[in-house]
Amino acid sequence: MDFLKSAVASAISKGPAFGYTFGDRVDTDDTIWTLYNGTKRVSINGSKCSIFSFDVNANRARLPLARNAVRKLRTLRHPGVVKVLDTVETDSYIYIATERISPLSWHIKRKSLTEETIKWGLHNVAKSLKFINTDAVSVHACIRPSSIFFGESGEWKLAGFEALSSMKEDDAVLPTYGSLIPDAGRYMPPEIANGGWEVLKQNPTHAVDSYNFGTLIFECFNGSYHGSDQLGQLKSIPPSMHQSYKRLLNPNPKARMNVAQFLDQGRRVGGFFQTPLIQLTEDIESLGLKADAERDELLGKLDDVADDFPAEFFKMKVLPELLKSVEFGGGGAKVFGTVMKIGTKLSDDEYEAQITPVVVRLFANPDRAIRVCLLDNLPLMIDHLPQKTVNDKIFPQMVTGFTDVAPVVREQTVKAVLTVVPKLSDRIVNGELLRYLAKTANDEQPGIRTNTTICLGKIARNLGSNNRAKILSAAFSRSLRDPFVHARNAALLALAATVDLYSEEDCATKLMPVICPSLVDREKLVRDQAHKTLDVYLARVRKHVQSMPDTALPPPSVTAGSTTPRIGTPANDTSWAGWAISSFTNKLSTASGDIRANGTSETTQRSSSLPPTSTTDSTKPTTLQPKRGLTLSKSTVASPSFSVSSPDPASAFNDDAEDFSNDWGGFDEDNKPAQDDDNDPWASATPTTTTTTSAFDDQGEPDFAGWLAAQKKPAKNQLPKGLAKQSTKAKPSSRPPIGGRSNTTGSTTASRKVVVAPKKETLKVEKKAEDEEEGWGDAW
């Protein structure tokens, strides 16, 4: 084999340039040619071809037949004839480059052809023979499996033009060299076997080819042919063909049916050529011109014969016509569905060459029916589409469906996200895609909102790890408040499916609180799912709690000059709040030291939540004295105001990507409603006197110091600076004296004291001292 290739290469190097490279040899029956697979040299993608090679020195006697084949193939053009690409003839060899073909004899010997496929192939050969006998007035004289080949489209192609002769030519090859045709005796008609090739001119032109066509029918259905004595066996031949078959083999050449008549017999109503395969090949070229009813009927036939047709025929013949019909002929969804079925049989290279360019152009088509059809069939073609094509060409056109006025287009676009998201880049998924999903989550159609929630749950693991927990929690919490029952149920299902994407702290503090209201939902469907979802989150939190330490307080350590505050708990106190009240009362009763007011020492116990009463040092900055066991930093003491704020849980999501959580309308713990102090059962008693202190937001914690202060009456002379005691003897209706004179009409003397407002600086210092004192509760 290698020697033969080297010999061919050396012969090419000595002769004219031949732009094709020889490949593997293809085994064929007895012919004057050696068939090779080949490729075109100058082609970028290495176009496939076949090469017929004739060695002049090894077979010089048959050189006229080889030269006749070259001449006839160059001049004879027909769809049923093998297409010639190039020919080269020298003194030592003859080469014919053709389209890529494979011998029919391979399939006949293996009996791998179905009855419908054989009829379809015979129909193609009969059309080619009709052209040769009737239009070209010529005789082929070599109709047999070795002269018929499968083309790239799976159609039967006619070759073997070594003896093709026109009866009008004086130097016809057939009468002189007909006996040199390989294996001529086995296929020779009876009149030629008896009288030689010279009797051709005495009989009709079609006589030899009609007889050989009959032997071809027998060999195709039986798998082999050895001689004329087998031709009477009709068992394997379809009954509908028996009568016409016998007329082809009539011993009398002048009474023998020609191939054109055989073709007409088969095309009649109910004839043996009235098959879906044959009708499809004749109608497929005019698919774009047919009416809707005719097109639907043709597509129905195509589905019926899909298994009988050669796959190559669908790729090369049917598929291009279907794509034209979809893109330009108004074929619609049905035609495109058939395209997708054929596309499953294509390789990635074939798919990219034939279907991908059309799909990209169709996504730019404004026809909504085409868009919905593309989105429906996207799962069938997504594996064949390159990622770059999806990101750069398809997705930019696809996103227009998110904002389309037709709800069906928006809904199909949301569903298609699940299919296309594996081919999208992270930048698109966490940017543009989330922006459009945020819009469909607020769509007016409840079905679209529900499908958006389902979509988010399924693509959750494709989102960026930095911000997906924040986005998903916001989106699902909003869906839990949706008035559509299936939207709420979808949110619960999505939360259960994505439980592993949230931290345990988020599960306990963010997600479980928004799930709990669904436990008493009006719909049983939602209630049942809420219980299941909550159980999933409870199991997650319980598992996490088992790994947590018992306390987060540091271990006690004894150091000089410092003591650890103790909270006493009575042994006999079993109420839940008893330990807290007793610890406060114990601390207050055991406190030592003096509280100075007006420069004197007072032993009256006061609540630390009340403002200081000092008047002499009111203009001096007040310094917060830390209590025993508590330490305040310099920055805390020096600050003009003291406040304790809880850390923002959302600050834990440090995401460099774009944040879309605000687009979903989810919960935001920073936007809590203000607490109603009037309804707070733990609020301190309101003093009867007016104070200048501002309200303190205790963040919802009980004001124990205020509660204790309310149990006792204010001590004497304990009013804040700037407020003076008013006389209780004055009558409510008494007027102030005019001109500074006292009222002499009443039996009692009423005096009016003017309350002087404290200076601004004094109030500021008192405000600071009050805030610092109240900050003790926060530190505790």
Image (cartoon, rainbow, N blue to C red):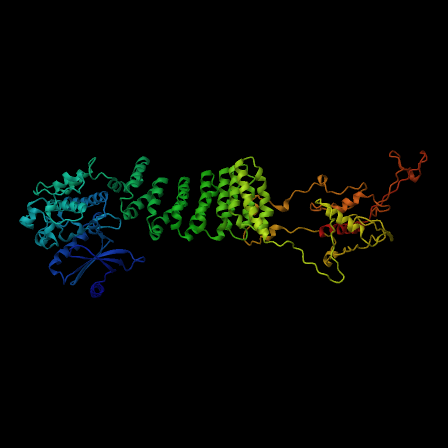
Outermost residue toward the front?
Answer: 572
Where does the image place residue 135, in percent across and percent down from the top left?
16, 44
Where does the image place residue 740, in percent across and percent down from the top left?
92, 40
Where does the image place residue 561, in percent across and percent down from the top left?
76, 61
The quadrant holding residue 92 is: bottom left
> In this orientation, which residue lies closer to the viewer: 636 or 233?
233
State the quadrant of the N terminus.
bottom left
Where does the image place residue 743, in percent across and percent down from the top left?
93, 36
> In this orientation, which residue lies closer to the viewer: 268 or 358?
268
Relative to 81, 360 lies left or right? right
> In this orientation, which residue lies closer to the viewer: 446 or 332?
446
Relative to 169, 310 lies left or right? right
Whether residue 409 is situated above or below residue 357 in the rendered picture: above
Relative to 396, 35 lies left or right? left
Relative to 192, 525 lies left or right? right
| Count of number-bearing discs | 0
Q: Is residue 136 visible?
A: no
Q: Can residue 72 be seen in this view?
A: yes
